[in-house]
Amino acid sequence: MVKDEKQLKRDTKLLWLFSFFLYLLLIFIYPRAGHGGDLEYWIGWVKHLMANGLSQAYTGSNVNYPPGFLYILSVFGSLLDSPDKLQDKIYALRILILLFDIAGALLIGYLLKRQGISPLMALFLLLNFGYLYNTLIWGQVDGVHTFFAAASLTAAIYRRPVFSVALMVIALNVKFQAIIFIPLLALLLLPVMLKNLRSGFLTVLTGVAVQLILLLPFIFSGQVLQIVKVMQDSVDFYPVVSLAAFNFWNLTLEGNLGAIPDNLLYLGITYKTWGLLLFFLSSAVVLSPVLLSITSRLYISSLITTKEIAAVFLSGALIVLCFFYFNTQMHERYAHPALLFAAGYTFLRRDYFFLFVVSLACFLNQEAVLNFLRLYDHPTVIFDGRFISGLYLISMVWGIVRLYLLLPIGAGIQSVKSIFKYEARNHVRKPE
């Protein structure tokens, strides 16, 4: 139901007000708990940054994250008097990270408002324990690159390529996993950039400039090559089938997947390669309707419908799930970004089943590992790896079916044909 402008403005103010008070509540009640291994990394890195400075982050340390996240740790370190009590204060890092989770919900609210839908729907995301668990309970930082990636795609939807690329570069510099959104972003931006080469050049230039700015401290300290090495080493950092991610491999293999090397062969191909092949194949299935319907139409018209925006966010969620579900070396939290994209789709199309199943799967997977609520002390089928893997599979199948209903292949083919008609109408023959 499309609401009037005054009501939308009132709802927007209410969303911001609720978000503000929820944030205040969370920073007072957040638990002094989290995943011990991850927190120990943050403690060591913050101590190193406080002692040596940001520009020396990669010297004499085990830092294995891109520079964007180190800026956040540097800000956190600058707020501390000394590193002496960091063991107790590291839990407060989530106060900064929660800002990005809140910002993600506000972004969805903005998206809804632009489409004439009450932004108050975004409150359901902030009340989604599965969405907050990764930051609030686990103590991880996936909410940061998730927000920037979603903001990048939103800017692309509304034809702001310069801002879109700048935001995606930031996302990549926080966590390199954001690279999985590049194909979807390219499908949205290429029509704009091809029609306006000047805009395309400025967009590329902006991306390069933002990257150089982020690297500036490391350029001056001569650490750029170390950053490149960190990115290269992040591949095969844990060369096993799964790191507690309950996915495709739980349905196909037995035993402790964290102890099974992913270079073992099946039909002459390694598990890792099988995972990549399945990821690329499933990604093609997800991106094909976007290419046929949305990319082709954006080439002709600047208009994009609510249904197509929902399809973009659904595609983003599915890309995350495909990445998490089929690849080896996956952590349990790598499915987290799907939640923000699933929320955007759900609130635009009222498909609550999809968000519910993804949220449940993400929560159960992380709680099965962390056992913060002590639910795993009484094992039931809901914490069984195959059950959770089945939930992810159900959400993927459901999402793909809904995507093809939103963007039928037949209509997509017609959109492609319209490009040729458009070019034919606008083609001017040169005089002989």
Image: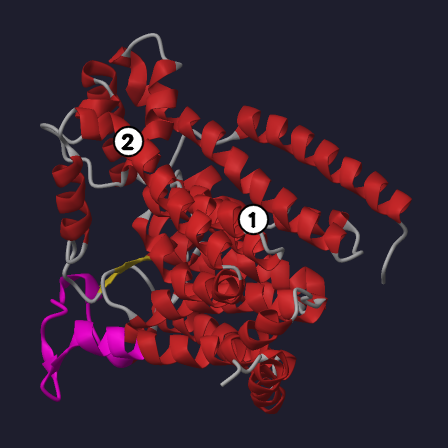
Please, is residue 217 above or below residue 328 in the view? above
Residue under pointer 1 = 129
Residue under pointer 2 = 42
Please, is residue 127 above or below residue 183 in the view? above
Residue 240 pos. (x, y %): 16, 63
Residue name at image x 45 percent, y 70 percent: 392
Please, is residue 240 above or below residue 424 in the view? above
Q: How far apart are marks 1 and 2 (CA)?
A: 24 Å
Quarter of the rendering occupied by the N terminus: bottom right
Q: Which of marks 1 and 2 is nearer the N terminus?
A: 2
Residue 142 visible: no
Q: How crowded is mark 2: few (under 14 residues within 10 Å), some or many (20 or more)?
A: many
In this rendered view, identify the residue nearer to me: 302 or 431. 431
Dividing the picture into quadrants, the one containing residue 274 is: bottom left
Residue name at image x 56 percent, y 66 percent: 312
Residue 68 pos. (x, y %): 34, 36
Residue name at image x 42 percent, y 72 percent: 387
Magenta segment, which residues?
252-278
Residue 199 pos. (x, y %): 50, 53
Q: How crowded is mark 1: few (under 14 residues within 10 Å), some or many (20 or more)?
A: some
Say if the magenta span includes residue 407. Answer: no
Whether residue 197 sits left or right of residue 115 in the image: it is left
